[in-house]
Amino acid sequence: MTNFTDLKQWEKVREGFEAAKGITLRQAFADDHSRAADMTVEAAGLTLDYSKNLVTRQMMADLFDMARECGLQEAINAMFSGERINVTENRPVLHTALRNRSGKSVVVDRMDVMPEVKSVLERMAAFSHKIRAGIWRGYTGRPIRNIVNIGIGGSDLGPAMAVQALRPFADRRLRFEFVSNIDATHFAEATHGMDPAETLFIIASKTFTTLETMTNGRTARTWLLETLKDEKAVANHFVAVSTNAKEVAEFGIDTANMFEFWDWVGGRYSLPSAIGLPLMIAIGSDNFNKMLDGFYAMDRHFAVTPFERNMPVIMGLLGIVYNNLHGAQSHAVLPYDQYLARFPAYLQQLDMESNGKSTDKNGKRVKIETGPVIWGEPGTNGQHAFYQLIHQGTKLIPADFIGFCKSHNPIGTHHDNLMANFFAQTEALAFGKTAEEVRAEGTPEELVPHKVFEGNRPTNTIMADELTPAVFGALVALYEHKVFTQGVIWNIYSFDQWGVQLGKVLAAKIYPELTSEQPPRTDAHDASTSALIARYRMANGRRA
Ligand code: G6Q
């Protein structure tokens, strides 16, 4: 495929960008009274108002044309139909099959995957019910009260984020912990004060070979057996989520207690698979299914809606404007909802692991900027911290503001205050405050330049009535498909993650050098790494 920057449609976008340089959002809104209405789209219970972006109608039209020229629709169709679009790993990309609620088949290698998808969902539902109803008991006959998920990356961030996001729908009698870090502190603190007799471990690993998860899993088994003192107890207290039955059995977990998923589900796209088991235990299968309905609604929207009204496509293209024309290096995600506190961290993996690539699909070094740095914190906290830089700093930081009309905790004036801030921030960022306005407030002249807000800081506003399981599913799918859209335009492979490998290989090599009695050869590493290893060995009483 040709580089998008070589397309005549991109040239038009660029010309539009140059022509619009002097135009402020103030002016754009003053000139065009239907801008806000026309730049608002609805999908799957979500509203996106993208009118406060640094684009003209013509630029958007050219961007949609460019996306068509880049073959975006064909790429979407290829993903949904199970083509092997994850070329470097030779796999289809079918997380959308996990939430395919249409009743239609999805065929991979001439086999319909839907019966298996449904059967795992049914097994998850039966198991979740047993835990929630106290039917599944620990080895000593006590009901399970603590669920500890052990996994990392894609086998951790999704369910950890979602259990927090959907807490209003969760069974409050159950305590959920997520252990990912190989730092023993994570396990020790998560299980502190827990009674092993009431604790279920979910060992979640697609490969079941990941160092962190296997190490934490073995520590969990030792911790359990120190109290329960019988290997047979493992069957009551450990279940696995994996694609690798052989390794699960070798770990000592009965494969009858394994919930399967498949190599066509990427780790960071696996929340709606069996990786979502802790979430299903928390909120129950009915709510989990409602979440899948939300995912599905956004999937359909993405698959069939013309780009002009297609929410993930619009967000993806806007990101390209900032990334590839304005030179923005980052993108902030600012949920005005405490339940979504972990959403930016989740999106960091989704976006940065997918599009943090510098080789294109032809194996050539890209000539363009690809994925931005994703970051964010819930509002209003950020307003008292880093928003200063967004308002008055020298860097352009496009931001997504996510908010809800109704709160799950309608206490006093909290929610109206929260949302007043939500609306105030995007307004201030877009329209700023001129020197004349500052002067009119009686500000001494020497302070005027400090109090001016230039405005023209772009934002998307994403709103829904309430953070329900369905809305949550739609929100996650929205970002998945935004990331997909950008990967297609940038002509990179979004579904591999080779960049994770090198550090893993080197760590495996260094581990014995830290622990052996013999110091490593002095030429084993560069001078810096060798000296740091020597420092560590000495501090632990080993010869440097
Ligand atoms: C996600 C990545 C990565 C992966 C973890 C855990 O897309 O592939 O984050 O999820 O490395 O891998 P396992 O599930 O195999 O333990």
Image (tube, rainbow, N blue to C red):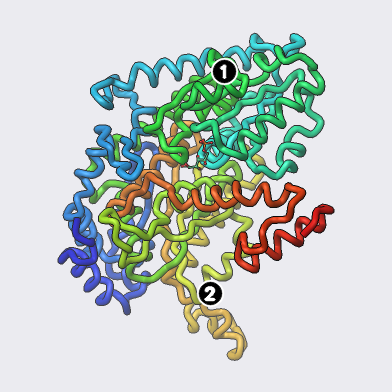
Determine the residue positioned at 46% across, 38% down.
Answer: 267
Q: Which residue is mark 1?
A: 128
Picture quadrant where residue 481 is located: top left
* Closer to us: 185 or 375: 185
Task: State the residue at coordinates (42%, 68%).
Answer: 328
On the image, the x and y values in percent for residue 192 come to: 79, 34
Q: Is residue 247 at all visible to an observer of this figure? A: yes
Image coordinates of residue 284 in percent, x first then y, are 55, 21
Q: Nearer the viewer, residue 136 or 205?
A: 205
- From the viewer's perspective, tell me whether residue 377 is left or right of residue 303: right
Residue beneath the point at 50% across and 38% down: 466
In the displayed structure, would residue 201 be above or below residue 88?
A: above
Check contact, mark 2 vs mark 1: CB within 8 A.
no
Amino acid type, callout 1: Ser
Q: Residue at x 67, y 63 (%)?
A: 522
Which callout, 2 or 1, points at the residue further toward the start of the chain? 1
Marks 2/1: CA distance? Answer: 49 Å
Q: Which residue is mark 2?
A: 392
